[in-house]
Amino acid sequence: MSKQHGEILFEKSSHEKLRPASVTKVMSILLIMEALDRGDITLETQIPCSEKASSMGGSQIWLDSTESLSVHEMLKAICVVSANDCTVAMAEYLAGSEELFVQKMNDRARELGMNDTTFKNCHGIDEDGHLTSSYDISLMSRELLQNHPSITNYTTIWMDNLRDGQSELVNTNKLIRTYEGATGLKTGSTSLALYNLSASATRDNLSLIAVVLRAPTPKIRFSEAKLLLDYGFSSYNFKKIATQGDVLQSINVNKGTQSTTNIVFENDSGVLVKKNSSSEIRQELILNENIEAPINCGDVLRYYELLYR
């Protein structure tokens, strides 16, 4: 899938419901980032560790119920080494309990159109009915990367440490070290789920997301994701038209305190183009000639269409 507009470039059994393992944490991370945006927490907020969080098992940094870590440290542990204990501690802090946090995860999944998904926990340890699909994983991965690009400050860490060097961290996503342009995103594996990966990478303005589920070995998980990304980068270009905040033009406003206002691009704008194609890109501005005050930031005044033929 392309990150910019969500086009699917290749798919196979994309709606088959499977166990996601720790790729589940993409949704947990998304909710953490949205809480940061709302100001519910800051990166410096100290997060305590409950007895439940410290007893999670699986991938962890062995949190003790007497200690707390900052949100910054928690994110680092979750993104780099998939720490179950940190994920549960964050869930409990943000929602009051893991169960209430999981409800928020499922609510957010519905909002994103993740119709193949039911979350039973926030970490991905195998549980009956805890299922999603490669398509749904691409949706939540895209939401995280598109609207919270700063998460790559964590997902691109190869090696780091916590607790003044006492806890060493090495990224479970080997593509970070070996694949040009890799930006993340999340691995997952259990004995039942086998080996899963949501991989992301950017080259020459084109950002792609490749999801692999139920690979038989870690090596195959990474090699299949690499093949998918290679296919996307070798077959497509992203033609960028404008950057977020660019002024398209100034327009006249009737009955306002100002006679004109600027129209700006809400997001980066462009179109996905298949390489070696003879198709043309046509730009068209759809005008509304009678614009009256009041005008607020975020109002849509004119549509700018990119037509690929």
Image: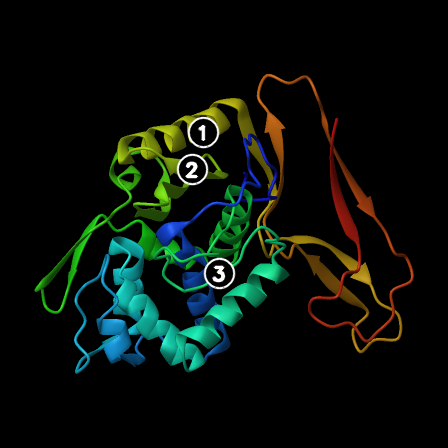
Q: For marks 1 and 3, give the CA distance.
A: 26 Å
Q: For marks 3 and 2, give the CA distance.
A: 19 Å
Q: Quadrant of the N terminus?
A: top right
Type of the residue with mark 3: Phe
Secondary-structure class at tag 1: helix
Residue drawn at point x = 31 percent, y = 64 percent: 75
Secondary-structure class at tag 2: strand
- Count neighbours of disc 1 (C-alpha within 10 A) and say few if under 14, some if 14 to 19, many if 20 or more: many
Q: Nearer the viewer, residue 99 or 47?
A: 99
Left or right: 188, with 229 as reference point: left
Type of the residue with mark 1: Leu
User: Where does residue 54 sit, x and y in percent of width and height?
Assistant: 22, 72
Select label 1 or label 2 by which is in front: 2
Left or right: 299, with 2 as reference point: right
Mark 3 and mark 2 in contact? Answer it, CB < 8 Å. no
Q: Residue furthest right?
A: 290
Q: Quadrant of the C terminus?
A: top right
Rendered position, 67 above or below 231: below
Type of the residue with mark 2: Val
According to the picture, the residue beneath numbered tag 3 turns out to be 119
Upstream in sequence: badge 1 or badge 3: 3
According to the picture, the residue beneath numbered tag 2 turns out to be 212
According to the picture, the residue beneath numbered tag 1 turns out to be 228
User: Where does residue 49 sit, x and y in percent of width and height?
Assistant: 25, 78
Select label 3 or label 2 by which is in front: 3
Left or right: 287, with 249 as reference point: right
